[in-house]
Amino acid sequence: MDLYTRYTYEKKWMKTSQKDALRMIEEEMPETDAAGTLKYILSETAKGKTVTLGACRFKSS
């Protein structure tokens, strides 16, 4: 499963590694547990959902 991200002001989805996704989560919401949030995002995107966190959106293919 590939993870894709884009900011709300962007038009194109970009393939993202889990390492980069963790960095993005830490930037968007520094007060949360980034690893736990990534685990939640991966579980929801596996169901076909798009998850929005601050100005960043996550989806899988």
Image (spheres, rainbow, N blue to C red):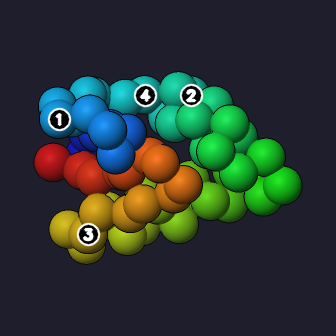
Residue at mark 3: 49
Residue at mark 2: 19
Residue 21 drawn at (x, y percent): 51, 36
**Marks 1 and 2, how far apart in space?**
22 Å
Residue 22 appearing in the image = no
Q: Residues within 10 Å of mark 2 (few under 14, many from 20)?
A: few
Residue under the point 47% across and 48% down: 55
Earlier residue among tags 4 and 3: 4
Residue 25 appearing in the image = yes
Earlier residue among tags 3 and 1: 1
4 and 2 marks in contact (CB < 8 Å): yes
Q: Residues within 10 Å of mark 4 (few under 14, many from 20)?
A: few
The nearer-to-camera label among 1 and 2 is: 1
Q: Is residue 29 left or right of residue 14?
A: right
Q: Residues within 10 Å of mark 1 (few under 14, many from 20)?
A: few
Q: Residues within 10 Å of mark 3 (few under 14, many from 20)?
A: some
* Type of amino acid at the residue the image marks with label 2: Lys
The nearer-to-camera label among 3 and 1 is: 1
Q: Nearer the viewer, residue 10 or 59?
A: 10
**Marks 3 and 2, how far apart in space?**
21 Å
Residue under the point 20% across and 68% down: 48
Residue at mark 1: 11
Q: Is residue 12 left or right of residue 37?
A: left
Q: Is residue 59 above or below residue 40?
A: above
Q: Nearer the viewer, residue 16 or 9?
A: 9
| Res 44 quadrant in image | bottom left
The nearer-to-camera label among 3 and 2 is: 3
